[in-house]
Image (spheres, grey):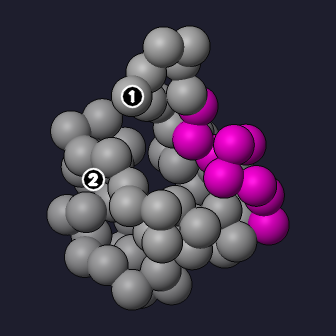
Amino acid sequence: MTNRIAELRKERKISQAELADAVDVTRQTIISLESGRYNASLLLAHRIAKYFGLTIEEVFLFEEGEV
């Protein structure tokens, strides 16, 4: 699964720390999400999508056949 977190964050000129504070995680979690080392839980994915005013599917991109 890939995501558009870095792209959305940069478009809005938001730092990793600001996003982390807004969705109640550490900056390291945001770094891990952006680099693809970590997949968000459903709750975190919802928080991030809501923060950007988007759906989960608009932020997190699922490839066909992924589990």
Asked if the stretch drawn in magenta spans residue 50, the answer is: no
- What residue lies at 69% left-to-right and 43% top-to-bottom? 57
- What residue lies at 58% left-to-right and 31% top-to-bottom? 61
Residue 5 visible to an observer of this rendering: yes
What span is in magenta? 53-61
**Label 1 vs 2, first from the N-terminus:** 2
Q: Is residue 26 left or right of residue 52?
A: left
- What residue lies at 47% left-to-right and 62% top-to-bottom? 42
Q: Is residue 48 left or right of residue 28?
A: right
Query: Label 2: few (<14), some or many (≥20) within 10 Å?
Result: some
Disc 2, SS = helix
Please, is residue 59 above or below residue 47 in the view?
Answer: above
Q: Between 65 and 13, which is closer to the camera in this rendering? A: 65
Asked if the stretch drawn in magenta spans residue 54, the answer is: yes
Disc 1, SS = loop
Amino acid type indicated by mark 2: Ile
Tell me the number on the disc at residue 67. Answer: 1
